[in-house]
Image (cartoon, rainbow, N blue to C red):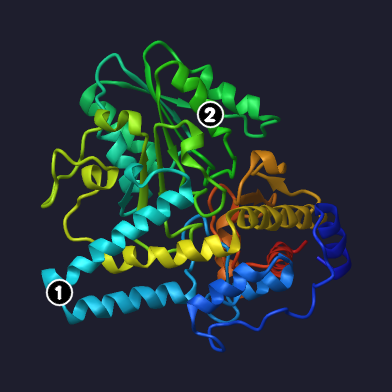
Amino acid sequence: MSTTKRRRFLQQLGIGTASLSGLPFHLDKNSNPSSRNILQTLRKSTLYDEPYWEMVKRQFTVKTGYLMVNSANLCPAPYFVTEAVDRYSRNLAQDVSFQHRSHFHEKRERVLAALAKYLGTSSQNIGITRNTSEANNIVVNGLDLGPGDEVIIWDQNHPSNNITWKHRAKRHGFKVVEVSVPPDPGSAEELIASFTEAITPDTRVISFSHVSNVSGIHLPVKEICVIANKRGIYTLIDGAQTVGFLDVHLDDLACSFYTASTHKWLMGPMENGILFVHPDIQEELWPNIMAAGWNEKSSTVDDKFCVLGQRNTPGTAALIDIIEFHQSIGKKAIEKRIYQLNSYLKNALKESFHSIQFVTPYEEELSGGVTIFKIPGKDAVSLFQQLYSDYKIAAAPTGGLRISPTINSTLSDMDRVVEAVKELSGD
């Protein structure tokens, strides 16, 4: 997209363009290695313009010339987060005594408190798993279900929130009802109806993704949960595509369970996940794994459901650094920026391709941080492979060509994606 068109589009979004050139800060990993100074500088800024986001981008150690727009799968962490993981790992390797390792327990408690505050709930309701899949499995295998019960699932759920229900149903005799939503929904009401119309007197659980990784559709989750609550139905929301992107407040969502990972939109260390269990139903969920240290009288989600033996403690300890990074920028600012990147990308694609097919709804209120599209006559897998091999752009071939940018991308990066797709498509 040309500079003139970019300025016009930003003006339409109500975003100033006076500072599109000339960085207000010269903060990067080489000139200032202190993460504390980085966080302080981010907090001081009140102008979320392109120079600001260029500064944010420089906190990531992506190889020169490469562009990572696959946050829906795996996002690189800022350099000071990976350095923290390395530091904690070296620290542990130097002394693996019980006495020394006790400080990792203290760090875990601090992380739990920070995660709870970040997600808008109590630390009693939050547990740290190894990823979203494990958190989903804890719920799927922990509820009392049997013959005569029904579970409603979205056909766009991640496998860990889809095939897990189906396999457990084979063992325990309950029924799984798979629902679809309109491929081009015109309103939130249409999405809600897909689930509510499937409810019967036997429905015990409704399980769905907050944002689909295969279409980018953003479900009106709170509305679905409120309807389910009135009928005594559990709700499990897979938030793998939302935590770190949307300004999520778990206590306001009215859900029974919420799961997520830290290595996607949160941009944190790998092998860490999140499990939220509503306080009113924590006694109704059975633990899956009981390792050394588990106690039947445990009163927190982390102690009751997430005691799994030896863990990747250095990675968990470093979660505090990425949470502080997000809070220094501001959750609302991050959400707005990711929506801006996707709206800008969709607009540029629409201008560049006459026959483009958007799998993801064009409207912001029905979509999230994932933009999926198809170019008629072009194979998405081939485009995905060539984007990386020829243009060093890491995307995904999920549901079409999937681009999922976060705050380590800029508007000029979205221009780069569009230009690369144009060249590959011969358009």
Instruction: Tell me whether the residue at label 2 lies in contact with that at label 1, contact meaning CB atoms closer than 8 angstroms.
Output: no
Residue picked out by circle 2: 180
Mark 2 residue type: Ser
Residue situated in front as seen by the camera: 122 or 287: 122
**What is the x, y in percent for residue 284?**
26, 28
**Image quadrant assignment for residue 403:** bottom right
| Residue in view at x 68 percent, y 80 percent | 25
Say left or right for 23 vs 153.
Answer: right
**If the image is split into quadrants, where does the N terminus sit?**
bottom right
**If the image is split into quadrants, where does the C terminus sit?**
bottom right
Q: From the viewer's perspective, is residue 177 above or below residue 243?
A: above
Regarding residue 392, the answer to whether it shows in the image is: no
Q: From the viewer's perspective, is residue 2 above or below residue 381?
A: below
Regarding residue 15, the answer to whether it shows in the image is: yes
**What is the x, y in percent for residue 207?**
42, 31
Q: Nearer the viewer, mark 2 or mark 1?
A: 1
Q: Secondary structure at mark 2?
A: loop
Residue picked out by circle 1: 96
Residue situated in front as seen by the camera: 200 or 253: 253
| Residue in view at x 58 percent, y 33 percent | 220
**What is the x, y in percent for residue 268?**
43, 63
